[in-house]
Amino acid sequence: MHQMDEAGRAALERACAELAELGVATVYEASGRQGLIDIPLQPLSPGSRVAGPALTVLCGQGDNLMVHAVMERVYPGAVLVITMPEPEPVALVGELLAIQAKVRGAAALLVDAAVRDVDELRRMGLPVWARFVRVRGAAKDAVGAIDVPVTVGGARIEPGDVVVLDDDGAVVVARARLEQVLDASRARAEREARLREELLAGKLSYDLHGLRAVVESRARP
């Protein structure tokens, strides 16, 4: 992201805005069901829809030293992806760290650990998704890594890959597939819009998807 020219950044911003609007379910299905971040995420601000390039943070176990360290690298539109070697209900982010991320223009935080100061985070308006909400504090001793590949919920996330988040959860789109997945997501959304009209007119997905024939063929003796 830092090395992109102005036109490249603008194109990425447009793509992220469109992916956020399309939503996690559409993007996941249109991508060939790839990139699902398969963990129980709590959106602290329900109704938020975000997409942005991943700024990854690999912390030491139970330690948030690297969350403090990453704040000088936050850039506008970034989705901070914060994880540890093993998920643990330790608060890696609270109000004071979130303030720093918001001031520097972060689009969202995805925390594969705990957060705290939930009321303050909600009032701040920075969208946060977390595996846990816990008060237990983190150490600040372990040097981890920033801008490295991480795995969250079975999904590999490279720095700069696009993370899409909403109330359904999260999915990651590899940067190399961004245009392909965006085109497929647009097409899927158009198909679903047409299908929605048919369903509102009283038709059944059972017939529109050819599922009746499947059931009836298997029900024959």
Image (spheres, rainbow, N blue to C red):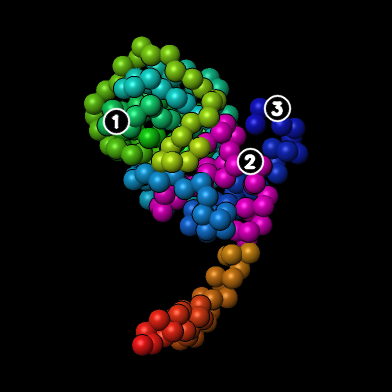
x, y percentage for residue 14?
Answer: 66, 47
- Describe the element under mark 1 as helix, strand or loop: loop
Residue at the location (52% across, 50% down)? 34
- Describe the element under mark 3 as helix, strand or loop: loop
In the displayed orientation, state which residue is furthest to the front. 221
- Callout 1 crowding tier (Cα within 10 Å): few <14, some 14–19, many ≥20: some
Which image quarter: residue 4?
top right
Q: Is residue 123 at least partly visible in the picture? A: no
x, y percentage for residue 38?
Answer: 40, 46
Q: Which mark is residue 88?
A: 1
Residue at the location (38% across, 20% down)? 60
Q: Which mark is residue 175?
A: 2
In the displayed orientation, state which residue is furthest to the top. 141
Q: Is tag 1's residue or tag 2's residue first in the polypeptide sequence?
A: 1
Q: Which residue is mark 3?
A: 3
Pointer 1 with pointer 3, Cβ within 8 A: no
